[in-house]
């Protein structure tokens, strides 16, 4: 069963009719088959029309869809021989960020990413994908390990932001994020980042200062959430639709601005309708990006990465 968003009600109704017809039995099976085919064609056109003109707020909802593939889904369907590596060697383990060695289409990589969790129990376990300082310090440790062994780093970003709790602040949240950004800029191996859902504020940037930054078609990436912006400007998160448009947080806006490098097209109806296909598309995009850096020396990779982000400040966005 699909979880349907508010704007998908016509889609939900049509899919309900199709399912009802498929469960009908009788002498007139030919007519039922024809009717299902007709409704299926209508559904395809409805999905194309709906998802072809999503607003920024609707894309925000899709990016947060509960059925959208998470980090652990990519590990299952995309990476082989995944070996998790835990702990920051300073404080403890943070389940909001998972990382480890793996193989992607035969290539060794260090893969690191946010995990939000899918049900109540797993969401609490992973702290809804909001990392504490030990999560970012673990990421630093894994990126340095990858550099030491000459292994490319792949990061999958999906977080509303870093955890804002008092305990995280007491352990140096902002310093840990800054050090993670610094490490991203400093390592001499290829670094590919993919925004697979929600890229929120410094919690996302800490893993996304990469040679190549990719975004799934219906993902979002912003300095603040629409609700957070609305609560500051209007003292109410109910006005989130307005800042969602103004923040230019969609993949299409960010590619136009020059913040990201490319967009990965999602299956019809969003990544949540075909998670395995989505994982394959992400994998192909990562491999393509890595192949473009195969013969580039580490120092050059580092310099290009640093210049890429410094130029955004020097010359402004497109």
Image (tube, rainbow, N blue to C red):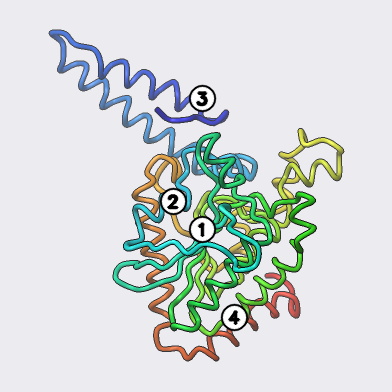
Cα separation, mark 1 vs mark 3, equals: 35 Å
Q: Give the mark nearest the N terminus, 4 or 2.
A: 2
* Contact flag, marks 4 and 2 (Cβ < 8 Å): no
Cα separation, mark 3 vs mark 4, equals: 44 Å
What is the number of the mark on residue 177?
none
> Closer to the camera: disc 4 or disc 2?
2
> Closer to the camera: disc 3 or disc 4?
4
> Closer to the camera: disc 1 or disc 4?
1
Considering every residue shown, the one lying at the far top of the view is 27
Please give the residue where the numbered disc 2 appears in the rendered image.
Answer: 72
Name the side, left or right, on which 104 lies relative to 264.
Answer: left
Q: Give the mark nearest the N terminus, 1 or 3.
A: 3
Q: Give the mark nearest the N terminus, 1 or 2.
A: 2
Q: Position of residue 277 (x, y in %)?
A: 34, 50
Cα separation, mark 3 vs mark 2, equals: 29 Å
Please give the residue where the numbered disc 1 appears in the rendered image.
Answer: 98
* Contact flag, marks 1 and 4 (Cβ < 8 Å): no
Quadrant including the C terminus = bottom right
Q: Position of residue 86 (x, y in %)?
A: 51, 62
* Contact flag, marks 1 and 2 (Cβ < 8 Å): yes
Disc 4: CA contacts within 10 A as few (<14), some (14-19) or many (>=20): many
What is the number of the mark on residue 305?
4
Name the side, left or right, on which 239 lies relative to 97.
Answer: right
Q: Position of residue 141 (x, y in %)?
A: 57, 72
């Amino acid at each position: 069963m699909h979880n349907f968003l508010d704007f998908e009600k016509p889609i939900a109704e049509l899919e309900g009719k199709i399912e009802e017809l498929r469960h009908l039995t009788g002498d007139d099976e030919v007519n039922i088959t024809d009717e299902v085919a007709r409704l299926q064609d209508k559904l395809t056109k409805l999905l194309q029309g709906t998802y072809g003109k999503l607003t920024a707020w609707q894309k925000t909802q899709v990016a947060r869809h509960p059925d959208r593939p998470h980090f652990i889904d990519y590990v299952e369907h995309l990476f082989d021989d995944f070996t998790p590596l835990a702990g920051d060697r300073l404080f403890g383990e943070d389940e909001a960020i998972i990382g480890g060695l793996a193989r992607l289409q035969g290539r060794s990589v260090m893969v690191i990413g946010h995990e939000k969790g899918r049900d109540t129990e797993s969401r609490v376990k992973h702290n809804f994908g909001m990392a504490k300082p030990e999560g970012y310090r673990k990421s630093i440790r894994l990126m340095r390990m990858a550099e030491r062994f000459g292994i490319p780093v792949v990061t999958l970003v999906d977080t509303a932001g870093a955890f804002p709790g008092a305990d995280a602040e007491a352990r140096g949240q902002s310093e840990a994020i800054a050090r993670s950004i610094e490490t991203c800029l400093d390592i001499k191996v290829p670094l590919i980042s993919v925004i697979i859902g929600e890229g929120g504020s410094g919690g996302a940037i800490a893993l996304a200062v990469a040679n190549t930054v990719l975004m799934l078609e219906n993902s979002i990436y912003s300095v603040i959430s629409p609700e957070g912006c609305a609560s500051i400007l209007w003292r109410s998160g109910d006005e989130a639709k307005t800042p969602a448009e103004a923040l230019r947080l969609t993949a299409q806006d960010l590619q136009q601005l020059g913040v990201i490098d490319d967009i990965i097209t999602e299956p019809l109806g969003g990544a949540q309708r075909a998670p395995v296909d989505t994982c394959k598309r992400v994998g192909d995009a990562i491999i393509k990006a890595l192949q473009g850096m195969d013969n580039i020396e580490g120092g050059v990779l580092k310099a290009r990465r640093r210049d890429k982000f410094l130029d955004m400040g020097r010359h402004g966005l497109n």
